[in-house]
Image (cartoon, rainbow, N blue to C red):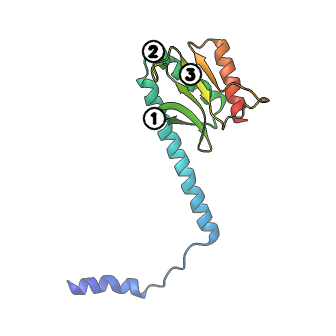
Amino acid sequence: MKEKQKSAKSPAATRKRYEGFTDEERDAMKARVQEQKVAAAKADGESALLAKIAEMREPDRAMGKRLHAIIKASAPSLSPTTWYGMPAYAKDGKVVCHFQSAQKFKTRYATFGFSDAANLDEGALWPVAFALKGLSAAEEARISALVKKAVS
């Protein structure tokens, strides 16, 4: 038994020690790890977001699904995620917009809102949340334009 342990240690002891990776190699590996984390987070974030939408009652569920499609088409750079248990969309790890169902806080309307990370500033006063009772073509167009502006 001791002989096997010694022989297992012997080759390792006689090998030349590897000095490590170059700075460029380390930077490339770090970049790849970051890419994988972003890709994994995006996939997991979308799954979590879709699960939250699926938990909603109608008509909020239908609005959540439609908003998801609008936001993905209008700002594909946003990453689906959840924020305080609500479907949300982030840029560089910061939530830009979110959808709150009416049932979340037992209100009479759902809300589509923007955070301070959204680029919607107009003078000294601008809206950051909108009540939603339904989505017609006009509301969809306005939301699409706001989301595009928010990430610009």
The residue type indicated by label 3 comes to Thr
What residue is pinned by disc 3? 111
Give the answer, above or below, for where 70 lies relative to 94. Answer: above
The residue type indicated by label 1 comes to Ala
In three-dimensional space, the C-alpha distance between marks 3 and 1, rounded to whole angstroms, equals 19 Å
The part of the image, by quadrant, that contains residue 58 is: top left
**In front of the other: 114 or 69:** 114
Camera-side mark, 3 or 1: 3
What residue is pinned by disc 1? 48
Residue 2: x and y in percent read 22, 86
Which disc is residue 58 wearing? 2
Label 3 secondary element: strand
**Count of all numbered marks drawn on residues in the image:** 3
Give the residue displayed 55% in from the left and 32% down from the top: 88
Give the residue displayed 29% in from the left and 86% down from the top: 6
Camera-side mark, 2 or 3: 3
